[in-house]
Amino acid sequence: SEENLLGETGEFLDGAFYPTAISRLSLLSTFLPDRPLDIWLCIRSYPDFLASIYGEAIRFSPVPPPEQFASAFSSPKGAWLQIIDDIRDALPHANVFIWRYEDFRDLEPRILEGLSDVEAEAFEPLQNPTVRGSASDSAIRAMAETAEPLSATEWRFRMAALEHEYPVQGAQDRFSPWPEDQFRKMQQDYVSDISAIEARADITFIH
């Protein structure tokens, strides 16, 4: 399982949605020409996913202003469908399993079993289940306004310091660069695309 297999966060900053996915997958196919493959893909609502992408990218290097990023993704409809097409083009014989990020907690046993081929009952709870969450809206916006030149290391330390200075206070402090009408439109795009994905005969959608 590799979250950057399809691409990295910095590739999104000019408005592209996993622009190197097809070349990366095609390269993978050259190394696994005769292996039966199961591809497991988690998809997430466009406004939440892209806000998370921006928040992750800003941890490592300068990024466009939030408003510019939001404008670049004003209409992401079809983006997940294109990624599935890219997977199909590069790995036509693979079995493709897809689920919604929003359903993960309910589907976790099924997904872990499918990924590992180990029965879910055999898993034990993690000893340290803490994960690094997204930075707060305040921390991300403060970092986006940074004007002075910083080295890559200085940039990362500055972002870490801002995350400590401005911790997440609750759901209301979640970074979201979208105007309300755009947020609703992006959610509608996601719902529409989910329906189209569920109707595909070349993938297995996990409910």
Image: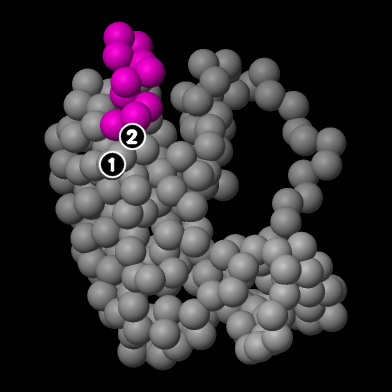
57 with respect to 44 (left or right): right
Left or right of 17 on screen, residue 140: right
How far apart are the alpha carbons under marks 1 and 2? 5 Å
Residue type beneath disc 1: Ile
State the residue position of label 1. Answer: 22
Residue 76 coordinates in the image, percent (x, y): 28, 69
Residue 59 visible somewhere in the drawing: yes
Residue ID at (37%, 27%): 28
For disc 2, the marked residue is: 25
Amino acid type indicated by mark 2: Leu
SS for callout 2: helix
Range shown magenta: 26-36
Reply above or below: 54 against 92.
below
**Which of the 4 image quadrants contains residue 33?**
top left
Q: Is residue 98 visible?
A: no
Q: Nearer the viewer, residue 110 or 178?
A: 178
Quadrant hosting residue 202: top left
Q: Quadrant of the C terminus?
A: top left
Q: Do the residues bearing badges 1 and 2 touch, measured as CB atoms within 8 Å?
A: yes
Q: Residues within 10 Å of mark 1 (few under 14, many from 20)?
A: many
Image: 72 above or below 10: below
In the image, which disc is placed on residue 143? Answer: none
Mark 1 residue element: helix
Residue 199 image point, x, y percent:
16, 45
